[in-house]
Structure formats: C-alpha cells, structure tokens
Amino acid sequence: MAYAQAKQVNAEIIPVIDITPLRDGSNPKQVAKALHLASQNLGFIYIKGHGIADETIEAARNAAYSFFHGSNEDKSSVSVSSSHRGWLQQGGAKMRDDAKADLKESFIWGYEDIKGTTPDDHPLRGDNQWPDFVPDMQKDAMEYFRQAHEVAHHLMRGFAIGLDLDENFFLQTSSRPLSRASFVYYPKQPEDMGDEQFGVGPHTDFGVLTVLCQDNVGGLQVKDLNGDWVHAPPIEGTLIVNVADLLARWTNGAYKSTLHRVVNTSGRERMSLVLAFDPNPETIIDARDIFTEGSNEFEKATTCGNYLNWRFNKAFSYRKS
C-alpha cells in the first residue's frame, strides 16, 4: 500500500502574485489583471505582500496546537454546535458519500462584532465557542480572522477590477459576513493506510474564496487542467488562495473552482490556518449582475446563505444526526 501520488508542480501552474500594489493603491489594475488571469486557469494563487503579521500567524498557530494537543475530554467541551462552531473531531467530514472519512480535526469560528457577539440570522452562524483550557485562543484567533479578512477584501476588490466592475461589487453586502475561519490539524498519516485515505479528500470549497496559511510541512495537492494531481508546496512568506464554488457560480464559470486534497506524507503533524470568505447571508449570487450576454444559460440566482446551508448539510455528518 502507498500514498496517493502527485507530480511536482511546475512553477507556472500556480502563479505567485504580490498584492502590495493592490493593498497600497499604487497599481491596483496591474494586480487585478494578474488575479483575473490566474482565476480563469487553475484558480489557485500564491499571494505575497499579504500584510498578515508574522507574529499574528505564530500566535494563531501556537493556540491551535495547544488546542489539538489537549485531551478529547477538554476538546469535547467545545464540540461543534449546530451553527458549525467549535471542535469537529476526526471523522466528522466526508467529501463524498463513498469516501473514507477525513483524518483531519478542525476548530471553527466566525465573525464577531466589536462586543464579541455574533448575529443569529442564519443556521451557519451562532456564538463562537472558546475553550477554557487555551485562555488566549479567542484573542489570537480573532486577530488572525481580522487580518486574513482584510486580505480577502483586497482580493475581492482585485477580482472586481479585473472583471471591469466597481471595485466594491463583491463587497456591497459584507458588513455581517458568513465567513468562517478554522484551524485544521492533520495527524501523521501512515503509508499503510493506502492511496484512498486522505487528510482531506478531493473536494472543491463551498463558498466564495479560501485564504490558506500553510505551515512548512506540505501535503496540499491540486488537480491541474490535464487531470493530474500536482503538489502545491508551501512557499515561505506566502498565502495560497483559491476560487471557491460560489465565486465560480457568480462569474458563470469564468473563474475556476478546482479540486484539491491533502495527503500528509511527511511523518509529521501538519497545521493549516484557513479563512473561508463569504459575504452576508442575504447576498444575491447571480451571474446576470456581471454578464449581460448569454443570460439564459446562467444558473438561477441563489443567496449565499441558502447555498452554503445546502452544501454543509450534505458534507458534515453531525448535521444529519
């Protein structure tokens, strides 16, 4: 038995884009053009010049390890709620009905207002659960959420500019985002588990945009345009972002949401810091708002909230209990 195989990535397949000129306003159109091109190909992009402080990443990662190294009894004190907040234990997610359960564990949280409270206006939104046995977790996690969310906002402005839209087109209804963040822990994966076992199985992401901070372990694999699996290794100082299903739908398939998976062959534990950016639940997702030609061929309009609720109900076993 062996691990699922992937090829070494060609440097041109997943481009590295410095978004500093977008963030500081010095040349947003140049960055937007590069983001636009990359999103029409594989939909995966390395981002440098992202602005998230190294100390913010380190503090978030340390808090995550403190949590996952805790006992199951301690972690169970914040077991995932019906609003998808808290600890999702190993085996809690399957990307396909016929697949083996993922090896990963996750801790999930979301938007809080300045008072530390969350709106209660959608099934995928509710109070965050913070573990007592990691006292700084709320502070460190929310600071990471805030800075990663700023990155997502810059990128969404860049996508809008690249599509010749008003730069705030994708952010018009984002004051109470459905965005979720997660610490995702991958244990060592023994080779004898075989090539059908994954840290997380092949899938596309559900929402609008994913912002991923990898560690230096590696394991992310992406399916390229030829149908081959290729490695997407960590590059120091970068994040990796990818178009998710709702942005592909919003752009009528012009931007690609691509299959990816994790196979941890390193013999070490792996940690990912993930932000899934999504606007307010009432946000209308309709490609007719972007394109006028061929409107009869577009998928019907939906809302961000309705679409995500449907996808989550299919993917997570606790929601079927």
Image: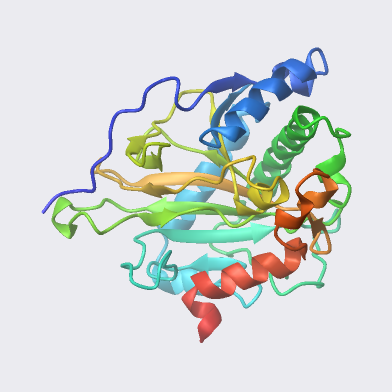
**Residue 72 in view here:** yes
Q: Is residue 241 left or right of residue 199?
A: right
Q: How many marks?
A: 0
**Residue 19 in view here:** no
- Seen at 42% across and 30% down, the residue is 234
As drawn, the residue found furthest toward the top would be: 26
Residue 178 image point, x, y percent: 74, 59
In the image, 254 versus 184, the foreground residue is 254
Q: Is residue 68 left or right of residue 196?
A: right
In the image, 227 versus 146, the foreground residue is 227
Residue 222, located in which quarter of the rendered image?
top left
Residue 289 image point, x, y percent: 84, 48
Residue 25 image point, x, y percent: 83, 18
- Seen at 51% across and 35% down, the residue is 42
As drawn, the residue found furthest toward the left would be: 1
Above-or-below relation of 65 to 18: below
Residue 58 image point, x, y percent: 54, 36
Residue 60, located in which quarter of the rendered image?
top right
As drawn, the residue found furthest toward the bottom would be: 321
Q: Is residue 190 left or right of residue 145?
A: left
In the image, 188 versus 153, the foreground residue is 153
Q: Is residue 87 left or right of residue 51?
A: left
- In which quadrant is the N terminus drawn? bottom left
